[in-house]
Image (cartoon, coloured by chain):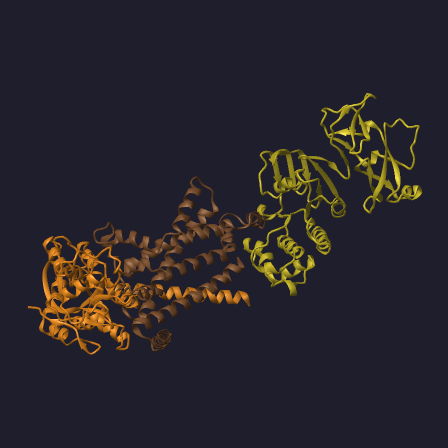
Amino acid sequence: MEYLIEGFLNAFHLLFTGDEETYSAVFTTVHVSSMSIIISLIIGLPAGFILGYYEFTGKKQIRAVVDTLLALPTVVVGLLVYAFVTRKGPLGDFNLLFEVSGIIVGQVLLILPIVISLSATAIESLDERLKNTLITLGARGNTIIISSLYEARFAIMAAAVNAYSRAISEVGVSMMIGGNIKWHTRTITTAIALETGKGQFAMGIALGIVLLAIGFFVNWVLIFFKKRA
Amino acid sequence: MKDRPLYELHDIRHSYNEFTLRIPELIIKKGDAIGLAGPNGSGKSTLMRLLALLESPEHGSLSFYPSGERKSSVTMLQQDPYLLKRSVFDNVCYGLKVRKDRKNHKKRVSEVLEIVNLDPAKFMHRSWYELSGGEAQRVALASRMILKPDALLLDEPVANVDTESSYAISEAANRMRELHSTTLIISSHDISWLTNVTDTVWKLHNGRITGSGNINILPGPWEKADNKLWAYRLPDGAPVYATEPPESDSIGILHPHEIIISDRKIKDTSAANKIEATIKLMVSEEKTGRIRIEAEASGKILNVQITESSAKKMQLIPGRKIVLIFKATSVIWH
Amino acid sequence: MKKFRLLACLSLTMIFLLSVSIISISSLSAEEGEKVLKMSTTTSTDNTGLLDVLAPELMKDTGIELKWIAVGTGKALEMGKNCDVDVLLVHAPDAEKKFVKEGFGRNRKELMYNDFIIIGPKSDPAGVKNKKVRNALQIISKKKAKFASRGDKSGTHQLELKLWKESKINAPDKEDWYIQTGQGMLQTINIAAERDAYTITDRGTYIKYEANMKGNPPLVILVEKDKALFNQYSAIEVNPSKCPKVNNALAKQYIKWMASKKAQKMIGDFKLMEKPLFTPNAK
């Protein structure tokens, strides 16, 4: 018990004195996951919209594939991306391995299915009376699409928040592609996973506290959006 | 140009569910208030959708001659309407924003909310989930009325709505007609309410317009009877006699003014039909100065009419037993 | 009011994400110009903290930024084979010599050594204190005393296996008393402590462990200073003929610096928890 309490006290000390190593990990995590979510939203929202709004051959199959990719373990994604970005792999020349950019690529692959699938569901969940209502009020063409997207805004934002949570808390990709290099690719999760084992218990707790705090905030936002949807 | 009707329909055929809507000809003029009555499946909603330009007829021509831009000249309020996930204010002025009509939104929204009897101060900033069913319906109506359409279509506007809201809706529809000569096309299965709000009520049955006013529909089947006439059995067995129908399942139409009401069986009449009935409902129609009677005859409700003075003379009241007398030739074929 | 809160939330999030992207774009361009050397090393090396002390000096003297990835020895060598790093710093001489022989590395340079020790419960149930290492292992095997192994192909693990062999004991692999953790040194020590087991560890990790336990650890040093427990650290250039894209020039510079008088002195002076750890031996 004493061990735990001491760990917590040291953790708070690290956080309040702005310990460089701790905050470097926090910053890397925030940086990486934010870039991942931005890229995923840019690619995933339009894709999810098309998947949810239009009818076309193969739609069901594509949806099934996307939904399956939702549950990919992070280490599997990490392994796959590693095989591609290692020097001997097809993307070896792009200098992605052990770099933040590599982690971002891996995380995008990880959370893209979430964004696509959940935003497609958001569009599909739109009331079937919506389109007629918009038309009868005078909307046409692009206006209908934009207004439909706006109507689905809460569910879409919930999808984004969901994806962000996954990116922030994943270890597999960050570890395998990032390599946990101090100051460079050490994220909150890789630090907790690897550094704690090396005896940096206080830093592990400190980082855990930060991760929990981010997680609480993100989920509070999620609840707010879900209610409205 | 001014003499052009608002809608001209020719030779329309359009399928819905398992039926086909068939309308050889229909003309609706500006400023008309038309009611469409009929049971579920009669094609009311389908006809409304065609008139609202939400669908194009599979066959035939539907011409719409609005005074302004085509796309904002007709608007429909569906049954159980959908409100956008926004405030009342944003819902009501959505149509204006789409038109890029940006002036005076606050004032115009307040005005139209008052027409549907919703206090702007209380309702303007409410969110979509803070309204009762009737209030939501009125907001939906307001969002369409603000567009000052040439044609306002209401599909079963009072089906699921409280009395206060149903009153507010009919008042609002009438105001639109008074203020802007809006053409009203309203569908409902509540004929009484419909006759009060509209000038003409057309009845639909199995996809066809069977006539206007409070006609009686005798759908068949028709069997040959012994007296060289054809009979249609009412639910409780009494026969209605008519001349030979074109087909055994033709629809027979009996206008109320063809039926004579008697308080006792008259023996010396050549009329083939003398049916006993009980008066169920008596409504005075201000527009015609007559009394419309719904009488239950052998299990079916028939519409009859009589002058006020005759009703007084015969001392007709609901519950009274009467005899309905009409000729076999009064039944015309659709 | 509610609309206001939603707008505030959204705008804060947007500003946050935007500033993050701006920072990341600018940091991307910053990285381009520097001299970056990628090195794979072992977790136990990283644990000592030696690299944290040497890296800033390396930067000062040569301008090279050292980025090292700490993994098990097996993985470290693998990364060299895959051309994912420019230089290796490991301590598994047999595996290293094979690595060079097979052409994956060249110019292996011995830099320093520290030693391994056998630790076990204070009560020393098997009675191996102060014995020679081969003798101790034979006793442990005979008495079936619990023994924790790294089991991860690391330098430590390979040394341990070598010692079993030299003690004429068959690989204990499937024995009940032999616990293969598959994890890093500190974790393995923790597990050994939990199970009251013996284990082999490098002195550096033990010093850290002792400090974590506030000088009163459940596992103590029982066997040490046997020549067989020698732990030689070497640096190897990843062979540019097999890996044309590696930064061989920087790798050479790094190794030269590590063997220099200054670095060697720093290595010798390095103290972990006020205890010396390494003996520099670059020729």
Indicate the chain coloured yellow by its letter: B
Q: Nearer the viewer, residue B253 or B29?
A: B253
| Image position, residue A21 (x, y; %) | 29, 71
The residue drawn where x is 86% and y is 44% is: B318
> Is B201 left, or right, of B43 in this rendering?
right
Is residue A172 positioned above or below A9 on the image? Answer: above
Which shade of the palette goes to chain C?
orange
Indicate the chain coloured brown by its letter: A
The picture quadrant where one finds residue C113 is bottom left
| Image position, residue B210 (x, y; %) | 72, 34
The picture quadrant where one finds residue C265 is bottom left
| Image position, residue B81 (x, y; %) | 62, 51
The residue drawn where x is 43% and y is 39% is: A57
Is residue B272 positioned above or below C28 on the image? Answer: above
Quarter containing the N terminus of chain C: bottom right
The residue drawn where x is 61% and y is 62% is: B126
> Does residue A69 show up?
yes
